Amino acid sequence: MNHPSNADVRRVATRTGAVAIPASLESDVAQYHYAPARRAGDFVYLSGIVACNPTSEPMSEAAFCDELRIVFKQIERLLSACDAQMEDVIELQMFHVFGRDRLDLDKAGQLAAIARVRDEFFFAPYPAAVELEVADLNPDGGLVEIKAVAFAPLTRATANEAVSP
C-alpha cells in the first residue's frame, strides 16, 4: 500500500494513545480546540474533514470529485499518522448540504459523485456508513463533511515497527 508522507504531522502522546495534527491544521486546532485524529487503544477516531467550495460560483462535478479526493487523501494521511490504514476504517459518517447554489449537482448527483470517489479509496467489504443532511457546515461553502472510525490493533502496529529496519 502507498502510504502518504507524515513528515508534517505532529504526534502528541496521550494517556490512551496519541493525537495527530497536520501542520496545515495547527491554527484550526489552536482556535477550535479539537484533535484531527486521535488513537484510543485499538481505535482511531478522525474529526470531520470538509469538502468545500469557498467561491460563490457553482462547483462542477469534476471539481467536486477532486475536492473529495483531497478529503479522502487527508483521511488516509491521518490514519497513517496513527498507525492505521484505509482498510481499517469500520465506519464513515458523511454530513451533506444539499440544494445549495455552490454545487452544480442535485442531491442524487452529489451522492453518486461521492460514491464513485469513495470507491477509489475503499473496497469490499465496505465500512459501515451513514449519510445525513445538515443545514450548514463550517467553513463557509462546506458541501460535505466526512469523519471516520478505524479499528487498528496496536499489536499489529507494534509488530510492523519490529519488522522495520
Image (spheres, rainbow, N blue to C red):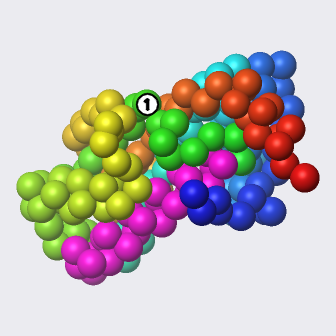
User: Which residues fall within the magenta stretch?
Assistant: 57-80
Q: For the point 73% across and 24% down, which residue is it? A: 155
- Left or right of 125? Residue 165 is right
Q: For the point 86% across and 38% down, which residue is it? A: 162
Q: In the rendered image, is residue 129 in sight?
A: yes
Q: In the rendered image, is residue 26 in sight?
A: no
Q: Which of 56 and 114 is in front in this view?
A: 114
Q: For the point 47% across and 59% down, which residue is it? A: 71
Q: Name the residue under label 1.
A: 90
Q: How many marks?
A: 1
Q: In this view, does 2 lie above or below 20?
A: below
Q: Quadrant of residue 11?
A: top right
Q: What element carries label 1?
A: strand
Q: In this view, does 112 lie above or below 159?
A: below
- Left or right of 30? Residue 105 is left
Q: For the point 86% across and 32% down, which residue is it? A: 13
Q: In which quarter of the image is residue 5?
A: bottom right
Q: In this view, does 142 lie above or below 31?
A: below
- Left or right of 135? Residue 159 is right
Determine crowd level at label 1: few under 14, some 14-19, many 20+ residues with C-alpha closer than 10 A.
some
